[in-house]
Image: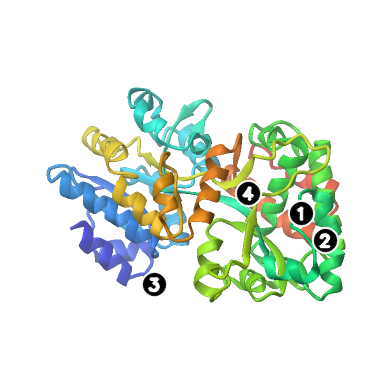
Amino acid sequence: MALSRRTLLGLAAAVPASAALAACGSSGPGKSNGGATYWYLNGQPQEGVRAGAVDAYNKAHPKAQIEDTTFENDAYKTKIKTAIGAGKAPTIIWGWGGGTLRTYAEAGQVEDLTSWFDEHADVKKGLFPSSFGAATVDGKIYAMPVEVVQPIILYYNKKVFDKVGVKPPESWDDIMALVPKFNAKGIAPFALGGQSRWTNMMWLEFLFDRIGGPEVFQAVIEGEKNAWSNPAAIDALTKVQELVEADGFIKGFSSITADSNSDQALLYTDRAAMMLHGAWSYGIQQTEGEDFVSSGSLGFMTFPPVEGGKGDPSNTVGNPAQYLSISSKASAEQKKIAKDFFATGTLQDDEVKKWIANGSVPIRLGIEKLLADAKGADFLQFTYDVASKAKVFGQSWDQALSPTAAETLLDNIVKLFQMSVSPKQFASNLNAVIGK
């Protein structure tokens, strides 16, 4: 039944979520005749891995089934919030943790899993410690970290570095010194899909950390008044605008979208020297960049330190994991199935191997041997080390904040990069939505 529903929704991808559910003969959101329900995102190859985990669990538990339903990204974000607000959420809620999870937890809409993790310490010990930050609200755990880690990485084109006769940057001063050298050769220092907004945000995430440490953005999350006006924050905002003014980014970056992968094409076609992007970019460059990756032309590193900064160089930012929560409205039987799925159905050996085959690094500890034997082993091991050894893994800001604050943030980031607001104006605008 789960498989047929999954297939039908896949065929009905262009149909509104509510209509697709009706077409599948659903008994309504969150209802499965006693079994647990599970909603998650479609789209390959991720959907195939998620579906495979459910199928494997159902095969092993014929009397305690999970019925899964898939949605496109934007449709899911709308549908899941509506269902949770109406008390008709699926048993298992797929999400990104952070600010949205906080709103659910504070409204009593998802289960507190703290005591469950205490009882299942082996489950927690088997996952990246850094994955639990975005699952935690006021010291309590409300979600199970699952799937893969996606830190933000500084990629660079070894060919153009050799052409210009320079070395990868080891500090922020090095970055600023490289900018005129690449521009003089007609090569953009950095590719950037600025129209997508969140791509610009990655620069601020690292600069805030490298200059002031993770405490600077943590103060924002905790609702500290005027947290965006921290001197370290103003310094970071100023440095970004100095990079823009120095022509650090590709000309016309504000009209380039990340969804089109045009920013990544600039790197592997030798038109840009560097690019700050997520770990998922490696697979895209491998697929679309012909022999760029296989020839060894792609270099990668973590974001360099800023001279005099307080942030630990091992700190990283991005997506520490994906997250599964349990609806507080689910029945006792459904909650039991969900928790059993968390313990025995997620990140099992077969699922882990599938994620790795897709060029991703699962958040399960002790998989070094599997990574070493995989295609792209050097990158996979690098990603694993960045994520597992980070003293702090900061969650992407637009996920860490509430939806309201995140939208204001993204709008003002565009203005910051377009030089239409000053660092102090940016801080003032964001201070106004702290805690909202």
Question: Which mark, residue 169?
Answer: 1
Front: mark 1 or 3: 1
Question: Which mark, residue 178?
Answer: 2
Between the residue at mark 1 and the residue at mark 2, the CA separation in whole angstroms equals: 8 Å
Three-letter code for the amino acid on which mark 2 is drawn: Leu
Q: Are marks 4 and 3 in contact (CB under 8 Å)?
A: no
Mark 2 vs 3, N-terminal side: 3
Between the residue at mark 2 and the residue at mark 4, the CA separation in whole angstroms equals: 32 Å
Q: Are marks 1 and 2 in contact (CB under 8 Å)?
A: yes
Three-letter code for the amino acid on which mark 4 is drawn: Ala
Disc 4 crowd rating (10 Å Cα; few below 14, some 14-19, many 20+) is some
Mark 4 vs 3, N-terminal side: 3
Three-letter code for the amino acid on which mark 3 is drawn: Ala
Q: Nearer the viewer, residue 227 or 168?
A: 168
Q: Nearer the viewer, residue 365 or 71?
A: 365
**Residue 157 spot, x, y in % from top left:** 67, 66
Residue 191 quadrant: bottom right
Q: Quadrant of the C terminus?
A: top right
**Residue 67 spot, x, y in % from top left:** 24, 51
Three-letter code for the amino acid on which mark 1 is drawn: Pro
Disc 1 crowd rating (10 Å Cα; few below 14, some 14-19, many 20+) is some
